[in-house]
Amino acid sequence: MKKKRFTLIELLVVVAIIAILAGMLLPALNRARESARGSKCLNNKKQAMLAQIQYSGDFDNYYIGYMQNKANDTTAGLWVGLLSCRPDAGGVYNVQDGGYVGRASLQCPSLKARNAPGDASFDSYHSVFGIDHSPADSTRATTLGDYILSRLQDPEYYVFALSRMKRPGDILIFADTLKVSNGYSFARFRCSSDEETAGVVMAHGGRTAASFADGHAAMHTGKELNAMPYNLKFWYGGTDGTVGN
């Protein structure tokens, strides 16, 4: 018996069907992949806040604020090193390894990072998500508390006093960040009207993974964060560098 062969038209129909199915499945797969990254990022923010809570238990109810390694102004090493294990700890303040959280928990999986968690220079500005680097302001102090304290050694670097927080659940500590000029994540952001070249980024479908002083983490839009209240006039939406408010 003669075997029936597919005609060219039939083969083209099969190819077209496969292409249609692939076109339907790929967006769903991409959404699932991004959802998984968002869940991982949210868990990382929770782990970072658990590290802050453990740190505060050892150091008189203070959270680490933004600080950098004074021996090398190109790194954010001090706050990163105080929370994670940093083999090259040192510099002016002679920071010892923190060990409160693994380095991989200080990155957003949806954003590009310059250094991997195992690199000695992991504490680069462009390897970790951001911590609040805002000077104290009267408006926020009235609503949320006068909890931002400057270090005596250098007034630009801060610690956060838990005893002065009025609404810990609304006090933003960590968020996804982007340095627009190079496309990397960045180690700090400002909750103020001071314009910077880096800011909170909506890295997960129009939302950022954020964690707060009471230890909880959640996905938020920029408008939701500003309602808490903040003045995040210069966060960057998506990855195109556009500014939202």
Image (cartoon, rainbow, N blue to C red):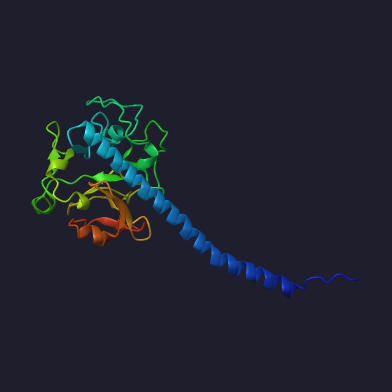
Which quarter of the rendering shows the N terminus? Answer: bottom right
Residue found 73% across the figure and 73% down from its top:
10
Which quarter of the rendering shows the C terminus? Answer: bottom left
Is residue 69 visible from the viewing direction of this image? yes
Total number of numbered labels? 0
Q: Where in the figure is residue 35, as x and y percent of width and height? A: 43, 56
Residue found 21% across the figure and 39% down from its top:
63
Q: Residue furthest bottom?
A: 9
Towards the viewer: 2 or 32 = 32
Q: Residue furthest right?
A: 1
Vertical placement of residue 223 versus 175, above or below: below
Residue found 49% across the figure and 59% down from its top:
30
Q: Where in the figure is residue 51, as x and y percent of width and height? A: 29, 38
Is residue 110 visible from the viewing direction of this image? no
Q: Where in the figure is residue 69, as x and y percent of width and height? A: 25, 32
Towards the viewer: 181 or 174 = 174
| Quadrant position of residue 52 | top left
Towards the viewer: 168 or 97 = 168
Vertical placement of residue 40 versus 56, above or below: below
Residue 103 horizontal side relative to residue 92, left or right: right
Q: Where in the figure is residue 104, as x and y percent of width and height? A: 39, 40
Vertical placement of residue 127 versus 5, above or below: above
